[in-house]
Amino acid sequence: MQEELRHQMALTQIPQIGDIVAKKLLAHFRTASAVFEADKHELESIPDIGVVRAAAIRQFRDYERVDNEIAFMEQHEIQPVFYTSPSYPQRLKHCADSPVMLYYKGNADLNAGRIVSIVGTRAPGEYGKTVCAKLVEELAAHNVIVVSGMAYGVDIIAHRQALLHNIPTIGVLAHGLDRIYPPQHQGTAMSMIENGGLLTEYFSDTQPDKQHFPMRNRIVAGIADATIVIESGIKGGSLITADIANSYNKDVFAIPGRIGDPHAAGCNELIRTNRAMLITCAADVLQTMGWDNDHSPKIRRDPQRELFVTLNEAEQHIVTLFTGDDEKHIDQLRQESHLPGSQVTSLVLKLEMQHVLRGLPGQKYQLVN
């Protein structure tokens, strides 16, 4: 089994062999090991393989990198999810260019009954922030998993609101699982592993290079039943994700905005050109998807502040920095607490989830009365 895993991972590292070609090889040979055991002539005889690709397969020798990655995965409890595995996301499997191998750290079911992707601009206005928060809150009672890309703006708001309302949420990364980009989202990412997960197609030493983000978007679009766009310019990653979702015959929804508002231009264009259905609330999504008449148990917690919350010493230290209705920026809390920045981020998120702190625009926080 370990040898097959080595060959599965090696298959993704061969120059000239992309996901579509790799699937053709698997269709012919059934296993990754059989691909590497095949002779030159058999490889060359397969359509779309030819001399160059056959040579690339036969000449692959970088098993040290593969073995190092397997050791990293074992150390950090990362699950390899190969294309032929039953745990591979079946929605994504039906997409022609889906990754052959995924790496996953988390506990959410990648084949859960209901999954939506929420995407949007990295610099949303107050309207977009409010709409995103409300939309996720309304989805909370309907066993919906929220997927996004861990980016600034709408992505991270969707993830954090999902955590706040106890919805499993999955972040799709454009780099390896040895880092979080942007690093400011480290605390949120750690919480997502406990209620959701982190997913990528890249080895652990892969940088968040520009070309990886459009590739990441195809996973965001393909893994979900539907994609929801909340505020987007006329160009950008959100529209790329929406167009990919359309190419996969997935449902696409968009929140309309004011004419002339640059934040709304992309959503309005998606609606105008019939590439997305206009929605104003989660009920529109639930009705269209046929999820509005279910009797499944609710998975959300009441967002009301919990009574008699027990705080540990570090959490109590953060709370004592607030007086009355004071508003404090996250950087101010890091400075005044004298704690590591990543720890403060994690503590603040936990206190927000316990409804002890309230998140405000501009990375400011306030005690909940």
Image (spheres, rainbow, N blue to C red):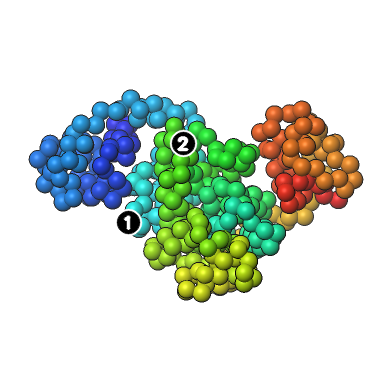
Q: Position of residue 260 (x, y in %)?
A: 62, 69
Rendered image quadrant of residue 36 = top left
Q: CA distance from mark 2 to mark 1?
A: 25 Å
User: Hey, which quadrant is residue 281 in on the image?
Assistant: bottom right
For residue 143, side relative to residue 273 (left or right): right
Q: Is residue 336 visible?
A: yes
Image quarter hosting the N terminus: top left
Q: Amino acid at mark 1?
A: Ala
Mark in front: 2 vs 1: 2
The residue at the point 63 percent across, 39 percent down is 184
Q: Is residue 257 visible?
A: no
From this view, report whether residue 179 is shown above or below residue 102. Answer: above
Q: Residues within 10 Å of mark 1 (few under 14, many from 20)?
A: few
> What amino acid is labelled 2 in the image?
Gln
Residue identifier under label 2: 207
Mark 1 or mark 2, which is nearer the start of the sequence?
1
Q: Secondary structure at mark 2?
A: loop
